[in-house]
Amino acid sequence: MSDNHNTSSPVESSSAPTTHFGFKQVDKNQKASMVANVFDSVAAKYDVMNDLMSMGVHRLWKRYTIDCSGVRTGQKVLDIAGGTGDLTAKFSRLVGPTGRVTLADINLSMLEVGRDKLRDRGLVGNIDYVQADAEALPFPDNHFDVVTMAFGLRNVTEKQNALNSIYRVLKPGGRLLVLEFSKPTSEQLSKLYDVYSFHILPKMGQLVANDAESYQYLAESIRMHPDQETLKGMFETAGFGQCDYQNLTGGIVALHRGYKF
Amino acid sequence: MPTSALVSAFIESGINKLLRLDEESAARLTSLKGARLIVYLEPLPNAFMLVFSERIDVLSVYESFDETVANLSPLDCCISTSIQTLPQLKETNQLTRLIQQNKLNVEGELAVAQKASGLFQQLDIDIEEIIASKTNDVFAYQSVKTVKTAHEKASNRVAALARNLGNVMVEEKPVAAHRLAVMHFSDEVNALRDDTARLEARLKQLEDPDN
């Protein structure tokens, strides 16, 4: 799980470099558009499916991320892969009118769903919506106090590039929080989780969102994502200090944290 | 951890639902906009932070009291107390005594705590109106009237029972002393204590006449 995660795999022949898309190996240049297709397909039912798949626990994971963010009035926050704006909504109130929250997502469908949802809730005035690739963030150096990325990093083609890019846009003293699926700490839980992910999840996706394939990809992409220690190492490679992580719900999800000094 | 996140989610949801039931609370909430109240309650493992905007967001705080105090902003107030002391905070004239007894520690902008306290103490929720909006006026009126009557009757019963029980214990089966007898006994004990103290002082004087 930890060795073949984020970068391109060694190429069998002299053809274009490849990377994983779920369990499949695909041309590196195609991954972004394939991920985009997945999220275009699920955007409308994204929130419903999240609640259903996690039985609402994803809200607690995100709440815990916000608790650990230490966001204060007047700060600048970047919520990468912010999707339908769960974190942004709360950050918007926490930073107040003197602060700013940027909701960034590479996928326009997700960004539009998030923007409509937040505007319908009356959250306007201190939120910017930016379609951006996490690997090449279109923001100045040393700009944000806090950067968060919830359930987005595993979809990025070159994860190390994304972490490097985040490091660049963070202010010195700023912190990065990455909430992402990870590796369960117990063998029994891992087996149970496999059954759930590969047998129940795609069926739920078919039933609710009429899209089993996207949820099959979700399960596969989770297995291909780096485990806790590997991701922590990637944080350190990017230059982050005081890196640590906390396993949530038995390691099904982990919250990684690192500071720029 | 998610357990504390679950608790803070429940608190947040409950507080905001309560505030929505009182239209006047919005104006009181406006005066707190931008402020934060951090509450450390022993023996809870973590503190809770109330962030005031158009609503109240409740976050869990995992830093220690001293760490939080070191990073307070001008509109922040940090309180440390225990669950047992909590009911006493309603009486604002007791605050100084509680601080002197180290039962309450307040850092930062005290006005935030006072306004937050006022926000909840002045809650005026018209239950009848809420039930009427979901059913109809007659049903709401009858329901509230029935509950009020039942509550009144129950209160009277409890008060009568307490009176009767007191009479039985003091008069009919004297297992407890009458209030006047207890007061007289206390006065006698005080007088005896004073006499003993005087005698002790006199004995000391006799044993050591130089002093």
Image (cartoon, grey):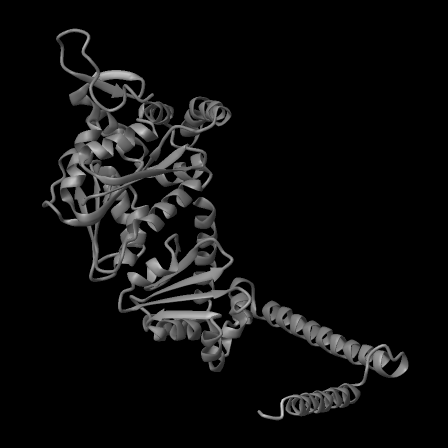
The image shows residue A152, relative to residue B105, as above or below, that is above
Quadrant housing residue B190: bottom right
How many marks do you count on the picture?
A: 0
The extreme right residue here reads B172
Most foreground residue, B50 or A29: B50
Residue, x 14% and y 49% (percent of image)? A143
Residue, x 32% and y 53% (percent of image)? A90
Most foreground residue, B140 or A203: A203
> A56 left or right of A229?
right
Quadrant housing residue A95: bottom left
The image shows residue B74, relative to residue A179, as above or below, that is below
> A93 left or right of A8?
right
Quarter of the figure that contains the C terminus of chain B: bottom right
Residue B75 location (% of width, % of height): 29, 69
Residue A52 in view, yes or no:
yes
The image shows residue B185, relative to residue A69, as above or below, that is below
Most foreground residue, A64 or A238: A238
Most foreground residue, B202 or A117: B202
The extreme top residue here reads A13
Residue B122 in view, yes or no:
no
Residue A134 location (% of width, % of height): 18, 36
Residue, x 59% and y 69% (percent of image)? B140
Residue B112 location (% of width, % of height): 35, 72
The image shows residue B11, relative to residue B169, as above or below, that is above
> A74 left or right of B89?
left
Quarter of the figure that contains the N terminus of chain B: top left
